[in-house]
Image (cartoon, rainbow, N blue to C red):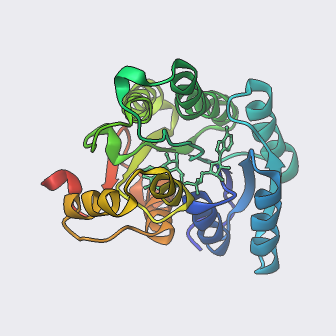
Amino acid sequence: MRLSNKVAIITGGASGMGRATAALFAREGASIVLGDVDKTAGEAAAAEIRAAGGRILFQPCDMQVESEVSALVQTAETQFGKLDILFNNAGIEQPLTASDVLDTALFERVIDVNLKGTFLGCKYAIQSFLRTGGGVIVNNSSVSAYANVGGNLSYAASKGAIMSLTRVLAIEYARRNIRVNAICPGVIDTGMNRRNLDLAADPDALAEKWMSATPMGRMGTGEEIAETVLYLASDQSSFTTGIGLLIDGGRVAT
Ligand SMILES: NC(=O)c1ccc[n+]([C@@H]2O[C@H](COP(=O)([O-])OP(=O)(O)OC[C@H]3O[C@@H](n4cnc5c(N)ncnc54)[C@H](O)[C@@H]3O)[C@@H](O)[C@H]2O)c1
């Protein structure tokens, strides 16, 4: 029970890494507000975790909309009394596209959801932490902040910027008992990568590219990510702030 008496918000919690992390956090004793733009999948994820004994509620939230992000934090405070942890996880992919013909509206949307959404989550979580005396943020960056296969410019730019944002916040609030870290997952078996493969001109070639770039030769799982998020969210990592923790099967070591 590494998170007993803790209150956590998990964004993008309806599927993939967010959902796996919500299930683990609930087993570790946290009370959870799950936010996601997908209402049906979010309600279903929360219902499943509640049926297994978890304390969790779902609230629809589009991370691009400031009032909806601040409302998530308000819900944690009114329903569970405070906020201790934010897993700022919601994000979208950019279908692989040559950068010289990348649609500007798509670029803006990816930056809006991934980067502005991460900023808004941090902004309102930190306001809450300052009221109560501290807290922890784990942002979901990506191995894409360091290594890419090309054709994902807006996504890689958003994830690189999340690393910079994480470092700035870690420094700014280090003496206010607020830790801010990021995870940098490699290729993980979630809906995002299933969509990436579906949209690829040659899905087998793309999968082969990913696997040959990953020394472990496989995709990671949402559960493997959840264990790392738990480490960074819990007091086990109490002297760690401002890092991006790679969970990438060895990819950046190559
Ligand atoms: N899958 C990978 O290989 C990989 C690698 C590195 C980083 N990531 C990052 O991990 C995070 C989780 O992705 P995943 O792989 O679990 O994919 P996923 O698609 O299964 O989950 C993403 C969730 O975010 C939600 N979402 C999308 N836009 C939103 C918005 N505007 N507001 C609120 N919620 C929104 C989706 O509805 C979905 O439930 C993302 O930030 C992604 O960029 C993924």
Of residues 76 and 223, the one nearer the viewer is 223
Instruction: Specify the farthest residue to the bottom.
Output: 52
Above-or-below relation of 32 to 244 = below
Q: Quadrant of residue 221?
A: bottom left
Question: In the rendered image, which quarter contains the N terminus?
Answer: bottom right
Residue drawn at x 26%, y 40% is 146
- Please state the horizontal and vertical placement of residue 227, each as a whole percent of the image: 46, 67
Residue drawn at x 37%, y 58% is 187
Of residues 76 and 104, the one nearer the viewer is 104
- Please state the horizontal and vertical placement of residue 168, each as a whole percent of the image: 40, 25
Is residue 104 left or right of 12 when viewed as pictured? Answer: left
> How many marks on residues?
0
Of residues 66 and 82, the one nearer the viewer is 66
- Please state the horizontal and vertical placement of residue 61, each as a whole percent of the image: 77, 40
Of residues 58 and 102, the one nearer the viewer is 102
Instruction: Specify the farthest residue to the right.
Output: 78
Is residue 233 left or right of 101 when viewed as pictured? Answer: right
Question: In the rendered image, which quarter contains the C terminus?
Answer: bottom left
Instruction: Specify the farthest residue to the left.
Output: 254
Residue drawn at x 25%, y 43% is 147
Above-or-below relation of 243 to 108 = below
- Please state the horizontal and vertical placement of residue 189, each as a whole percent of the image: 46, 66
Residue drawn at x 20%, y 62% is 212
Above-or-below relation of 34 to 50 = above
